[in-house]
Image (cartoon, rainbow, N blue to C red):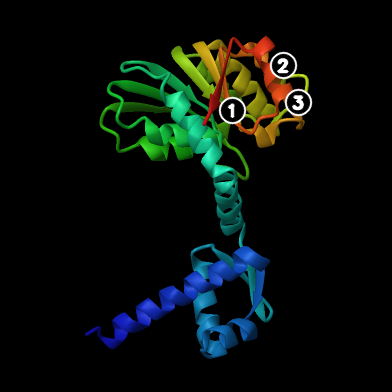
Amino acid sequence: MKSEPQQKRQNGAARARAIRAQLTESASISITEMAEKLGVSEMTIRRDLADLEKSADVRRTHGGAVVAERMAFEFNYLSRQRANLNEKKAIAIEARKLVEPGQRLILDTGTTTLQLAALLKDCPDLTVITPSLAVASELQFSENISVVLLGGVLHRGSPDLTGPVTEHCLELFSADWVFQGAEALGDDGSIYNVDLQLAQVDKLMRKKATKSCLLADSSKMGNTALAKTGTLSDFDVFITNQSAPAAYLAKARKMARQVIIAQ
């Protein structure tokens, strides 16, 4: 039987999860509303919010709380990871087939390349070079993979390193493959990123690898973003999902050296 302090800690953790869940939906909450919803006093909710504020999850306001910047980042990144998740996993499975033991890989900061990273753990004697804190974290306990985390400036709003320091670090390496994602794919085969510095790093990555592979699901097609990083012609392999429009695939096959449709 649980002691009273243990029960209180469990109840407090459950309330914290409920508060975080509410903030994912509305980005702000009132103390009165949460007290009624959870069946506790407003004083209890105030203590819960104080604890969450200490961990930088929320910022208290008069009568309630709003999402703190750190928590907003977590929600934003999780949302990006979960978008078209099945398609990303299918694309990553096809990309994994290109990797052979002993190779050196560059993985960029995309959420699809993160899915690929999760599939690499059984491949012996790999070296993975990346500016992504998420990719490095995914692979850090893999005994058969040597992870090189590039230096740089932390990109606001994502766990990625970028800038001149990242570019300088990349100059030190060469790789067999680079795997990249894209924020948008124009109808003319252009590839876009939302950030100028990330776009520059993408271009340099391709120069440092013998072969390049683009991983992008069909939701990216027919769109543009701030910075053009290249075209499909810059890639040896383009992997997308089976929902890609036939007209786009026809153009892609004229540009990329190989197009793979993930089932």
* Horizontal arrangement in the rendering, residue 163 relative to residue 121 (left or right): right
Comparing 221 with 108, the one in front is 221
* Horizontal arrangement in the rendering, residue 3 relative to residue 80 (left or right): left
Amino acid type, residue under disc 3 in the picture: Gly
Q: What is the x, y in percent for residue 146?
A: 33, 26
Amino acid type, residue under disc 1 in the picture: Thr
Numbered disc 1: secondary structure: strand
Numbered disc 2: secondary structure: helix
Amino acid type, residue under disc 2 in the picture: Lys
**For residue 164, which quarter of the picture?**
top right
Q: What is the x, y in percent for residue 204?
A: 59, 16
Q: Which residue is mark 3?
A: 186
Q: Which residue is mark 2?
A: 251
Circle 3: is it few (<14), some (14-19), or many (20+) Cα within 10 Å? some
**For residue 258, which quarter of the picture?**
top right
Comparing 248 with 127, the one in front is 248
Residue 209 in view in this figure: no
Q: Nearer the viewer, mark 3 or mark 2?
A: 2
